Amino acid sequence: MNEFDLIDRYFKPLDEEIRGIALGIGDDAAVLDVPPGEQIVVTTDTQVESVHFPVAAAPAAIACRSCAAALSDIAAMGATARWVSLALTLPRADPDWLQGFAAGTADAIRSAGAVLVGGDTTSGPLSITWNIIGTVPRNAALRRDGAQPGDALYVSGTLGSARAALDVLDSRDDDPSRQAILARYWNPEPRLALGAQLRGIASSCIDVSDGLLADVAHVARRSGVGAEVVSDELPLLPELVALVGGGRAREFALTGGDDYELCFSVPLDVETKLSQLRLASDVPLTRIGCITRDPGVRVIGRDGRRVPVSHTGYRHFD
């Protein structure tokens, strides 16, 4: 099977007829119609076997998890995901693997309301690159550089479970706590609806991919501010605490990464709007700290005392 047969068999069926696509899969490039009054938001995310997912992982799970990671960037900008392109490097063209990967791809992009419009395939070590194109109303995108001293700091969902999953990925144990942790690792939920709802409320936003402290530090540097994170306020899955204990769970939440939740700051004078959103949303939103004038990110307890941490998050290169 050559690369053209591969595309026609497994990925061309995902090129649905949908408004906004003037020309999709099958040409040298896609031609897209941008809705009036909107700006394009583009992100690219690469995942590599043995770095981002284990060898011999199920292909559908690899597709869902890797695509969700890319979609999470679109969510953090408050944008609507519309079009997806995929660059896939394969060690061999295995029909069973490709069938599973295509099914996982379909689930991930359809649940986001997006559509596959093109990509590339080549031979080599397994690597997956997603290019997601979204749109957002003009000048309404959420950014990292808008946090102000006094803003409250929030996070969606729960943190730390994906890091804990790394220790039990090969486990055959049916323990409910382990299964709940693995589900959070393999099936992260990009908060696309929440990101759009935060437009006009959040002063800054980022998705939690490198670790909460590392990502809050990105916001702080871009905004020229600092931040305090209260470790006792971190939202933790009960199964995570049951599996590793409270102290380790908080450490994973602070530094583990791969949670793909949204961390955002909110000015105090619009917290009422956020309160209304919290009541209407099925995604938990937890206040975990505040933005400060002093630079740097500090972790404190409820008593205000500083909590030491060994590192802040994941880095590809030291």
Image (cartoon, rainbow, N blue to C red):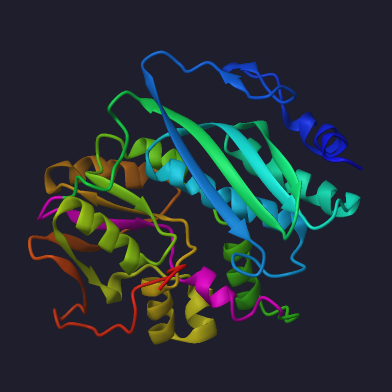
Instruction: In the rendered view, tell whether residue 3 sits above or below residue 314.
Output: above
Residue 171 placement: quadrant:
bottom right
- x and y percentages locating residue 292 in the rendered image: 11, 61
Q: Which residues are magenta?
A: 148-170
Front residue (pair 1, 22): 1
Decide whether residue 162 is among the magenta residues: yes
Front residue (pair 97, 203): 97
Q: Left or right? Give the position of 31 relative to 107.
A: left
Decide whether residue 300 is among the magenta residues: no
Q: Left or right? Give the position of 70 relative to 197.
A: right
Instruction: In the rendered view, tell whether residue 207 sits above or below residue 146.
Output: below
At x 77%, y 36%, the residue is: 11
Front residue (pair 294, 243): 294
Residue 214 placement: quadrant:
bottom left
Q: Work out which residue is located at the far left of the displayed protein and give it.
A: 293
Residue 305 placement: quadrant:
bottom left
At x 68%, y 22%, the residue is: 24
- x and y percentages locating residue 239 in the rendered image: 53, 75
At x 28%, y 75%, the residue is: 231
- x and y percentages locating residue 182 in the rendered image: 63, 69
Would residue 287 be visible to someone looking at this image?
no
Count of numbered marks = 0
Q: Left or right? Give the position of 194 relative to 148.
A: right
Which quarter of the rendering shows the C terminus?
bottom left
At x 27%, y 27%, the residue is: 139
Would residue 110 be visible to someone looking at this image?
yes
- x and y percentages locating residue 225 in the rendered image: 14, 58
Which quarter of the rendering shows the N terminus?
top right
Instruction: In the rendered view, tell whether residue 25 sits above or below residue 185.
Output: above
Instruction: In the rendered view, tell whether residue 192 sits above or below residue 90.
Output: above
